[in-house]
Image (cartoon, rainbow, N blue to C red):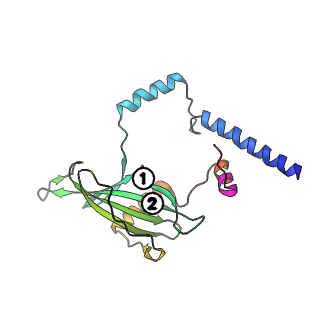
Amino acid sequence: MKKNISLILLFLMIIFCCNIVYANDGGGGGTTNSVENRADEGNSESSKKETRFEKIGEDISFIYLLDKKDSGWVRRPFTANQYVISAWVKMLPYEYVSNDVLYIPTEERTYYLVHYLIDPSSRKIQFLCEVEVTGRPENNIKQRKYNPNDWEDLVPESVEDTIYHAVVNKYGKSKGSNSLTDIIEDVFHIAIT
């Protein structure tokens, strides 16, 4: 019994040390966090503005932009260990001024904000809500409640097919547990910081 406890404590100490190294290494990206590098990063970050939305596709009607802050892996409702991707997509409509001239809308124009759940394991998508927005959206959206029977198959070349493939390309086909810490947190239900 004492040997098992010692092994667990040794294992946790190794993980803790790995976390310290990982944090000191700038999150595992192979960069150093010296004062000079942080100063250089501050100058370059101020020169380029970080945007909330990332372009993930377009067709003849819309430009599709994924909300990077509020999209990502979430636990599937009513399950303990299954995950789906929650994706907020901004759909900016094109406007045709004449037959040959295309006007790309600006931020002040009307756009659509759509919320989907995406299940890469079964190649299905579930629509939760769509809001038509002019200016800034309000936080009074009425969404459909999650229903396990509302998953839809993908129709080739549909809007949902375009969004599905773009989001899955960004987040992957399964929730990745790349670090040993994530595995231990999931198995033992403890938080290692």
Q: Report the front residue among 10 and 178.
A: 10
Question: Do residues under tags 2 and 1 come within 8 Å of each other at their CB atoms?
Answer: yes
Q: Which residues are magenta?
A: 184-188
Which image quadrant is residue 15 in? top right
Q: Earlier in the sequence, mark 2 or mark 1?
A: 1
Q: Residues under labels 2 and 1: Cα distance?
A: 8 Å
Q: Amino acid at mark 1?
A: Asp
Residue carrying label 2: 86
SS label for mark 2:
strand
Which residue, given by chain and number where applicable, does mark 1 sit on? 70
Say above or below: 22 vs 116: above
Q: Nearer the viewer, residue 135 or 105?
A: 135
Q: Secondary structure at mark 1?
A: loop
Q: For residue 26, which quarter of the picture? A: top right
Q: Which residue is found at the position 51% from the left and 67% from the top?
A: 77
Residue in view at x 60 percent, y 36 percent: 23
